[in-house]
């Protein structure tokens, strides 16, 4: 995947993509295929899909169907290179209309270089459904590959993890807007007893509105930096929210460290791995550094997880260590199943192959 993205970057710089069809066939289709979609199956990768029943001349450039026209659908609207900004509001209205008769999970606008990801199923104006952007010329290929796998990967669409991740990204956007709205009031609070720090004032004001923002997030916002990727929303009763303070917010964050540790061991193969959930909401499954994995993958390993495995090897996150591979750093997987597949080199049941130190299976948690 990384090599593919580097090749696309070279072609973008060489101005080889001359029109919208080049973008759709020679760029978008390559990426879609790399993250697990069968581009030769017209019921899975459907070009010129008629999403609006009453209008004959409107078609989605590329529609992806993970489960036979079920709700796991992606709409991709392609533009010529450099044309994504041409009347963006009009294109967003067009895509909103596409989703009236057949609601897609995600809707994507791309001119090949720029990619805009919208979570179609959430409420609000269409432009507020934007949860992610990519720039294939400026963003690091490794990060771009991970993003495409997370939000466009066939398996992640089918198993629902892409939807959960998109909801988390939208929560992040909501937090940024909310902090901007209450910033003037927070600046007043720091001049009055008990003279809180500005990040604490922001967190307390938003807690009173039922939105939990950590001190780390508030500090990043004030510094003009990207907020850390959020966990799933913490549900807070309205009466509790009014009394929530920065101290309570920090206590909630501290709960994340009190998570069970899981182990995967294949004694005959010499494989031994340790992992934890990333947070109390189980957003990610983090395999710890020094965990080991099978040296070779079996034929039964899925295309998506085989590609992810190769990317980890290329990034030196997985390196050869004797008869096995070893993780050189912690790595966050979308699920315990994905982690188990990559480690074992074949498809496994993540709910049963991982267990705690007492032998209790992960699926029992």
Image (tube, rainbow, N blue to C red):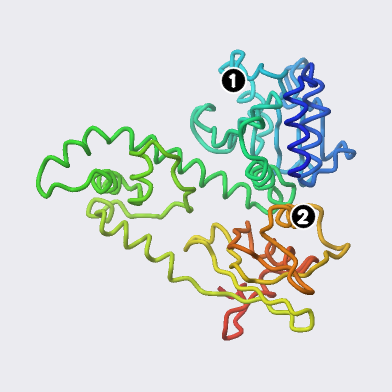
Q: Residues within 10 Å of mark 1 (few under 14, many from 20)?
A: few
> Residue 295's spot in the image, x, y percent?
80, 68
Could you tell me which quadrant the N terminus lies in? Answer: top right
Kindly state the secondary structure of the residue where label 1 is placed. helix
> In this rendering, would 253 be left or right of 320?
left
Could you tell me which quadrant the C terminus lies in? Answer: bottom right
Q: How many marks?
A: 2
Residue position marked by numbered label 1 in the rendering: 93
> Residue 49's spot in the image, x, y percent?
79, 27
Residue at x 77% of width, y 24% of height: 23
Residue 310 image label: 2
Viewer-closest of 165 and 113: 113
In the rendered image, the vertical position of residue 365 relative to residue 329, given as above or below? below
Among all residues in the image, which is located at the extreme left?
193
First in sequence, mark 1 or 2: give its number: 1
Q: Residues within 10 Å of mark 2 (few under 14, many from 20)?
A: some
> Residue 336's spot in the image, x, y percent?
64, 65
Viewer-closest of 109 and 299: 299
> Residue 45's spot in the image, x, y percent?
82, 36
Q: Marks 2 and 1: in contact by CB < 8 Å?
A: no
In the rendered image, the vertical position of residue 232 relative to residue 94, given as above or below? below
């Amino acid at each position: 995947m990384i090599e593919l993205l580097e090749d696309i970057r070279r072609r973008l710089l060489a101005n080889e993509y001359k029109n919208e069809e080049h973008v759709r066939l020679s760029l978008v289709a390559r990426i879609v295929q790399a993250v697990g979609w069968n581009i030769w199956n017209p019921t899975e990768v459907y070009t010129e899909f008629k999403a609006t029943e009453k209008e004959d001349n409107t078609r989605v450039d590329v529609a992806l169907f993970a489960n036979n026209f079920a709700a796991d659908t992606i709409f991709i609207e392609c533009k010529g290179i450099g044309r994504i900004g041409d009347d963006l509001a009009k294109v967003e209205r067009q895509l909103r209309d596409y989703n009236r008769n057949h609601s897609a999970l995600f809707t994507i606008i791309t001119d090949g270089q720029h990619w805009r990801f919208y979570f179609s199923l959430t409420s609000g104006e269409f432009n507020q459904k934007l949860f992610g952007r990519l720039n294939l010329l400026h963003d690091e290929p490794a990060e771009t590959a991970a993003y495409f796998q997370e939000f466009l990967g066939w398996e992640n669409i089918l198993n629902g993890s892409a939807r959960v991740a998109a909801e988390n990204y939208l929560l992040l956007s909501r937090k940024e807007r909310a902090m901007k709205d209450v910033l003037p009031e927070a600046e007043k609070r720091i001049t009055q007893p008990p003279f809180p720090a500005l990040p604490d004032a922001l967190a307390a004001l938003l807690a009173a509105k039922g939105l939990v923002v950590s001190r780390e997030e508030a500090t990043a916002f004030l510094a003009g930096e990207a907020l850390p990727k959020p966990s799933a929303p913490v549900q807070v009763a309205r009466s509790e929210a009014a009394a929530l303070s920065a101290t309570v917010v920090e206590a909630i964050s501290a709960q994340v460290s009190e998570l069970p540790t899981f182990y995967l061991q294949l004694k005959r193969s010499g494989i031994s791995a340790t992992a934890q959930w990333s947070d109390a909401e189980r957003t990610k499954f983090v395999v710890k550094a020094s965990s080991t994995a099978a040296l070779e993958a079996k034929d039964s390993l899925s295309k998506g997880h085989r590609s992810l495995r190769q990317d980890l090897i290329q990034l030196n996150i997985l390196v050869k260590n004797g008869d096995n591979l070893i993780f050189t750093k912690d790595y966050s997987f979308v699920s315990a199943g994905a982690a188990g597949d990559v480690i074992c080199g074949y498809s496994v049941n993540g709910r049963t192959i991982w267990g705690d130190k007492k032998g209790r299976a992960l699926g029992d948690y």
